[in-house]
Amino acid sequence: MILANAIIIASRLVKDLMPACERIQVVGSVRRGKPAVKDLDVLVIPGTGFLPKVMTLGKTKLAGQKIIGLTYHDPVETVDVQLFVADEKTWATLLLIRTGSAAFNKNLAIDAKRKGYSLKASGIGVVNSGGNLIASHSEAAIIEACGLKYREPWQREIPLSLSQQNKRIDCEACGLVYP
């Protein structure tokens, strides 16, 4: 679907889920502003009545405690949705990781490792080899701890032809600029 339709549908989904969430944010390709969107990714901190509310919105498929697949029946079209469950401690890291792009995340993980750190996909944040937390409170702090300058979500896209290479991509045009 085109981005404009994805934004409209995502807005309706957020409106539907908002009463059952403490916090909610559209992530993934919509947040990055990709012109073509395959599905919707949404990060949530569940509130009271979250799962019953989700189940009223379409067919659900639980993929563990942290990911819920949903076939959302919007008046315009039916859309596949991934709901990623966070809490306050994991919010910033999951916001960053679930926004992507996958190649951008791969670069962050490679750069973290070069510094002796690890970017934890569980949402913990960036930790050192001793397991001590280095950064987790904001996207900017996590990105900078990995050695990159902060880039807005729409600057985190890496062309598919480059992202399929099995190595770190250092490409100013992709928003990956070292200080």
Image: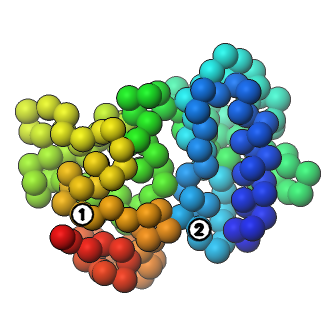
Way the structure is coloured: rainbow
Residue 123 placement: quadrant: top left
Question: Which residue is rendered at x = 61% and y = 49% of the image?
Answer: 26
Query: Residue 120, position in %: x, y?
Result: 29, 41
SS category of the residue bearing label 1: loop
Residue found at the far right of this picture: 75
Indicate left or right for 116 with 167 as reference.
left
Determine which residue is flagged by label 2. 33
Q: Which mark is residue 148?
A: 1
Query: Residue 132, position in %: x, y?
Result: 14, 31
Q: How many C-alpha atoms fall within 10 Å of the one at disc 2: few (<14), some, or many (≥20)?
A: some
- Residue 64: tell me if it is visible: no
Question: Which residue is rendered at x = 48% and y = 32% of the image?
Answer: 86
Indicate left or right for 153 with 118 as reference.
right
Query: Residue 144, position in %: x, y?
Result: 24, 56
In which quadrant will I find the N terminus?
bottom right
Q: CA distance from mark 1 to mark 2?
A: 21 Å
Indicate left or right for 176 with 158 as reference.
left
Sequence order check: which comes first, mark 1 or mark 2? 2
In which quadrant will I find the C terminus?
bottom left
